[in-house]
Every structure is written in structure tokens, then in C-alpha cells.
Image (cartoon, helix red, strand yellow):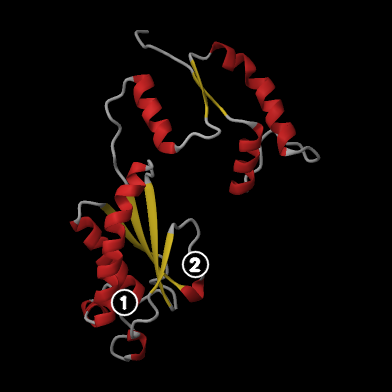
């Protein structure tokens, strides 16, 4: 009681929906073993038609950009401006263990001298100060971090303008224990210093 309930119905053209299912490689929940995606979509339309008829607002998302959809939601439901935030994750990994899935950008830092070949540094990781210093003191590392920081200084506002909420940056070396770890930590800190919500994870730091 006391709540203003409204129904928002989102739809899209069959062509657009088929494309989305193809790109995401997801199976339509109403698709039969022998049926097509288009047939499943049409069946779904029939099932949801009673809901569509009583909806307060119907929005066709076929060609709707995320930023425009966000603006429509704000206007339609009288929200205050939605938070303009972008959660950035920096993930280190080792190429020999495979490139992580679901990342937006991959950087290969195997051009930087490898601490693995120093017997004193080999048992350590990029989180340990001796390895961190070895990696970050390399001129190539400093130049790389400066360039990447400058790149994302221009890209992040553009991502925000498009309504992107998450950005995952992957940094890879051979094993994912030394160089990529130290650089991922440093890049995450640089982004945080610029006011970007950044967190870091090390996928392969414990692997051999």
C-alpha cells in the first residue's frame, strides 16, 4: 500500500533479438530442440502480449544505445541523476595459463625483463618489494605505465558517456606471477589516484 507501481515493457525487433542471441551465444529459454530462435521469440511475444497491453510504457530497444536508455529511465521514473560510476578491474594473468575470458582490454608485458631468471627473485611474486622494484624500475615499464595511464585518461570518460558500468583490463606475462602482478598493482594505483574506482586481482599468482 502507498506504492506507485508502474509497468515498463521492453521489446525489440525479431532481427535485433536474433542478433543478440547469436552474439551472446545464449539459448532462448523457450526454444525447442527442433525450433529456431525466431520461432521462440514469436512464441515469447504471444505469451507476454497480455503484459504488454497493460504496460504504462513500452520501449523498443532495437537501436537504443545504453546511454540513451539510461537517460530515458531517469526521465521516466523521475530518479535523481543515476551515479556516473565506472568500476574498473585490473587482472594479472599468465599467457601459459590462457587469456582470461570476459575482459575488455589485454596488455602483453612480456617485453619487460623477467625476474624469473633471477634465482633470488624467482620464489617471490610481484607483490613482494624486491620483485616490484625490479619490474617497476625498468625504463620500459615506466614508459608503458605512462602511456597506458594516458590512454585510459581519455578512454574512461568516453566509456562513462556511453553508460558503461564495468571495465576489465587484463595484464599478462608468461606465468602470471611476477611482471604482470607488479604492473597490475601499479596501474590500479595510478587509476585510483585519478579518482577511478579500481580494484586488482591476480588470477595466476599461485600457479607454477
Image spot of residue 88 (x, y percent): 33, 53
- Residue 41 left/right relative to 115: right
- Residue 60 left/right relative to 187: right
Circle 1 Cα neighbour tier, 10 Å, few/some/many (<14 / 14–19 / ≥20): many
Nearer mark to the viewer, of 1 and 2: 2
- Residue 98 left/right relative to 165: right
Whether residues under marks 1 and 2 lie with C-beta atoms below 8 angstroms apart, the answer is no
Q: Quadrant of the C terminus?
A: bottom left
The secondary structure type at the circle numbered 2 is loop
- In which quarter of the view is residue 34 placed? top right
- Residue 24 left/right relative to 137: right
Q: Residue at x 18, y 57 (%)?
A: 193
Image spot of residue 168 (x, y percent): 39, 56
Q: If you read the primary sequence from the N terminus, does the residue marked by circle 1 or circle 2 appear first? A: 2
The secondary structure type at the circle numbered 1 is loop
**Of residues 98 and 59, the one drawn nearer to the viewer in this rendering:** 59
Whether residue 22 can be seen here: yes
Residue with the mark numbered 1: 125
Image spot of residue 71 (x, y percent): 37, 29
Whether residue 122 can be seen here: no
Residue reaching furthest to the right: 34
Q: Quadrant of the N terminus?
A: top left
- In which quarter of the view is residue 94 placed? bottom left
Residue with the mark numbered 2: 99
Q: Residue at x 28, y 30 (%)?
A: 81
Q: Is residue 172 above or below residue 4?
A: below
Image spot of residue 93 (x, y percent): 42, 69
Residue reaching furthest to the top: 1
CA gap, disc 1 and disc 2: 19 Å
- Badge number at residue 49: none
Q: Residue at x 24, y 81 (%)?
A: 139
Q: Is residue 128 above or below residue 161?
A: below
Amino acid at each position: 500500500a502507498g506504492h506507485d507501481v508502474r509497468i515498463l515493457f521492453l521489446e525489440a525487433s525479431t532481427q535485433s533479438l536474433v542478433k543478440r542471441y547469436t552474439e551472446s551465444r545464449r539459448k532462448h529459454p523457450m526454444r525447442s530442440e527442433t525450433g529456431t530462435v525466431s520461432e521462440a521469440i514469436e512464441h515469447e511475444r504471444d505469451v507476454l502480449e497480455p503484459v504488454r497491453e497493460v504496460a504504462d510504457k513500452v520501449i523498443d530497444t532495437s537501436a537504443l544505445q545504453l546511454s540513451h536508455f539510461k537517460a530515458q529511465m531517469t526521465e521516466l521514473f523521475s530518479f535523481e541523476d543515476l551515479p556516473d560510476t565506472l568500476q574498473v578491474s585490473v587482472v594479472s594473468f599468465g599467457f601459459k595459463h590462457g587469456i582470461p575470458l570476459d575482459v575488455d582490454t589485454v596488455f602483453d608485458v612480456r617485453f619487460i625483463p623477467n625476474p624469473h631468471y633471477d634465482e633470488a627473485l624467482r620464489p617471490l611474486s610481484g607483490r613482494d618489494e624486491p620483485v616490484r622494484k625490479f619490474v617497476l624500475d625498468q625504463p620500459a615499464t615506466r614508459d608503458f605505465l605512462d602511456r597506458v595511464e594516458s590512454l585510459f585518461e581519455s578512454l574512461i570518460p568516453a566509456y562513462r558517456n556511453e553508460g558503461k558500468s564495468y571495465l576489465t583490463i587484463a595484464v599478462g606475462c608468461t606465468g602470471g606471477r611476477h611482471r604482470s602482478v607488479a604492473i597490475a598493482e601499479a596501474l590500479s594505483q595510478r587509476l585510483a589516484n585519478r579518482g577511478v574506482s579500481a580494484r586488482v586481482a591476480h588470477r595466476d599468482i599461485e600457479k607454477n
